[in-house]
């Protein structure tokens, strides 16, 4: 049985992966981000289908069943090595910290800004296909609309706090992926994180915005302002949770350990 890597080895793996992500050409980054945007829609659609089928007979159990179905969308993202906003916080940040003489702020902003915008474009465009009458089973539209209404009717501070949790969870996914050595382990971790994200449900800006957009398409009384507000609040919360709670603390853990080793050697 392979030994789990220690934080230093995880950090070194993250630096290597972060360099790959930062060095993508604009065309590659745009294409990879677009793929992630429409790929996650499969998980959202699966949640809606399962929720719509289960809820009439089993009530609240449908929420758990829908969360179990959503996990496959995150598995698709991880196995396909696509570029999802917030999941790409830890690795590039590790590379930036490891880089001598530069924090790579321009490169990080380019990576994260392009990913966010193109994820949304890909997700919104693919949502149009699922919203065509006859694509999803009966009851799915109602389930997705109900979820969307629940999102936009929450108080702003509730959405922000939920997005902090969601951002921490998705950034934790990227850290954990560097800690495992097999495709099976990556699939398992991705599925568990996807399940937990939907079970909350905790806000991830791309997933949450696409949910709200489905409500908009299914005439759930959701307007452009609610969609824009959702994107802004969820993005802010994801940055606080993903960068502040997970990325910076894991980077500080490794830097502190290496400084201690350096002091001991001297």
Image (cartoon, rainbow, N blue to C red):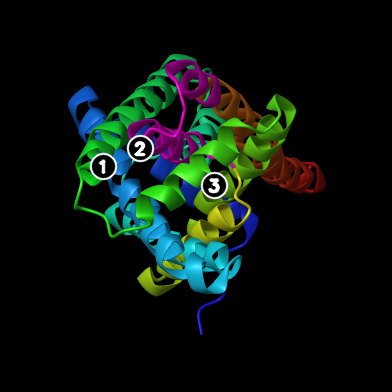
Q: Which one is in front in this view, the residue at disc 3 or the one at disc 2?
A: 2
Q: Is residue 15 left or right of residue 128?
A: right
What residue range appears in magenta? 203-230
**Residue name at image x 66 percent, y 30 percent:** 240
Residue 44 spot, x, y in % from top left: 39, 51
Residue in view at x 53 percent, y 66 percent: 62
Q: Is residue 74 visible?
A: no
Q: Which residue is mark 3?
A: 170
Question: Which secondary structure lies at badge 1?
Answer: helix
**Mark 3 burial class by Cα count in 10 Å: few <14, some 14-19, many 20+:** many
Q: Which residue bears the numbered disc 1?
A: 131
Magenta run includes residue 159: no
Name the residue located 56 percent from the left edge and 66 percent from the top edge: 64
Residue that numbered label 2 is attached to: 218
**How far from the left and from the top, in percent, is residue 249?**
71, 40
Determine the CA span between mark 1 and mark 3. Answer: 27 Å
């Amino acid at each position: 049985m392979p030994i789990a890597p220690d934080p230093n080895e995880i950090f070194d793996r993250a630096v290597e992966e972060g360099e790959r992500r930062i060095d993508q050409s604009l065309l590659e980054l745009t294409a990879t981000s677009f793929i992630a945007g429409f790929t996650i829609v499969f998980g959202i659609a699966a949640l809606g289908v399962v929720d719509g089928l289960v809820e009439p007979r089993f009530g609240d159990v449908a929420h758990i069943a829908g969360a179990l179905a959503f996990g496959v969308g995150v598995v698709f993202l991880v196995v396909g090595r696509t570029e999802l906003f917030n999941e790409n916080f830890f690795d590039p940040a590790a590379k930036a910290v490891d880089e001598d003489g530069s924090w790579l702020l321009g490169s990080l902003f380019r990576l994260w800004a392009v990913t966010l915008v193109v994820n949304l474009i890909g997700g919104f465009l693919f949502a149009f296909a699922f919203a065509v009458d006859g694509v999803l089973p009966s009851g799915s539209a109602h389930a997705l609309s109900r979820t969307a209404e629940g999102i936009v009717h929450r108080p702003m501070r509730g959405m922000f706090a939920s997005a902090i949790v969601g951002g921490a969870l998705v950034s934790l996914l990227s850290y954990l992926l560097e800690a495992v050595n097999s495709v099976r382990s990556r699939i398992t971790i991705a599925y568990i994180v996807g399940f937990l994200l939907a079970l909350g449900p905790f806000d991830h800006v791309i997933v949450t915005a696409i949910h709200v957009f489905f409500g908009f398409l299914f005439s759930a009384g959701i307007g452009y302002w609610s969609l824009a507000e959702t994107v802004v609040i969820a993005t802010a919360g994801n940055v606080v949770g993903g960068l502040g709670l997970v990325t910076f603390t894991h980077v500080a853990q490794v830097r502190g350990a290496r400084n201690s080793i350096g002091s001991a050697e001297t």
